[in-house]
Amino acid sequence: MDFKNEIDIYLRSRFTLICVVSFEEDRILDNIKQVCQNSNRKLFVWDHADYFQSCSEGSEVPSAAKDPISALEAIEKMEGDVVFLLRDFHQCWHGQPRIFVN
C-alpha cells in the first residue's frame, strides 16, 4: 500500500495522532496535501519558526500559536474535518510534561 492510501485510511478511521518519520519532508507534505484536497479536509502546518500556515485555499489560519502548548490549544478549538501537520514536534516533547497532561 502506498503512503497516500495509508494516510487516507488513517484519516477516515479518525486516528487522533499519526507520527511520520522521514527525511523527505516536502514529499510527505505534498502527499498529505493531495489526500486532504481529495477528501475536502483543511490542512494546517505548524512549526517553531512560522507558526500556523494554511495549506488549503480559503482557510483561515488559527491564532498565532508561538509555542507548542498554544498550538495544541488552538487545535483543540478547531471544528470540522481538519488535519494538522506539526513539523518537528518531537522536539517539544522533551522538557514539556504539560503536553501529555489531559
Image (spheres, grey):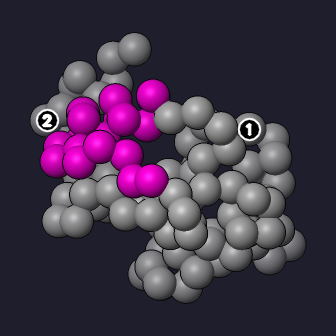
Position in image of residue 45 (x %, y %): 42, 61
Quadrant (top left, top right, bottom left, bottom right) of the C terminus: top left
Question: Taking 10 as reference, is 45 left or right?
Answer: left
* Rendered residue at 16%/47% (across/down): 66
Alpha-carbon span between mark 1 and mark 2: 29 Å
Residue 35 visible in the snapshot: yes
Q: Which mark is residue 86?
A: none
* Residue nearer the viewer, 48 or 19: 48
* Rendered residue at 58%/81% (across/down): 30
At label 1, the amino acid type is Arg
At label 2, the amino acid type is Gly
Residue highlighted by disc 2: 95
User: Is 55 covered by the magenta stretch?
Assistant: no
Quadrant (top left, top right, bottom left, bottom right) of the N terminus: bottom right
* Residue nearer the viewer, 10 or 43: 43
Q: Which residues are magenta?
A: 60-77
Residue highlighted by disc 1: 14
Q: Who comes first in sequence, dot 1 or dot 2?
A: 1
Question: SS class of the residue under badge 1?
Answer: loop
User: Is 76 covered by the magenta stretch?
Assistant: yes
* Residue nearer the viewer, 59 or 19: 59
Q: Is residue 60 above or below residue 32?
A: above
Q: Nearer the viewer, mark 1 or mark 2?
A: 1
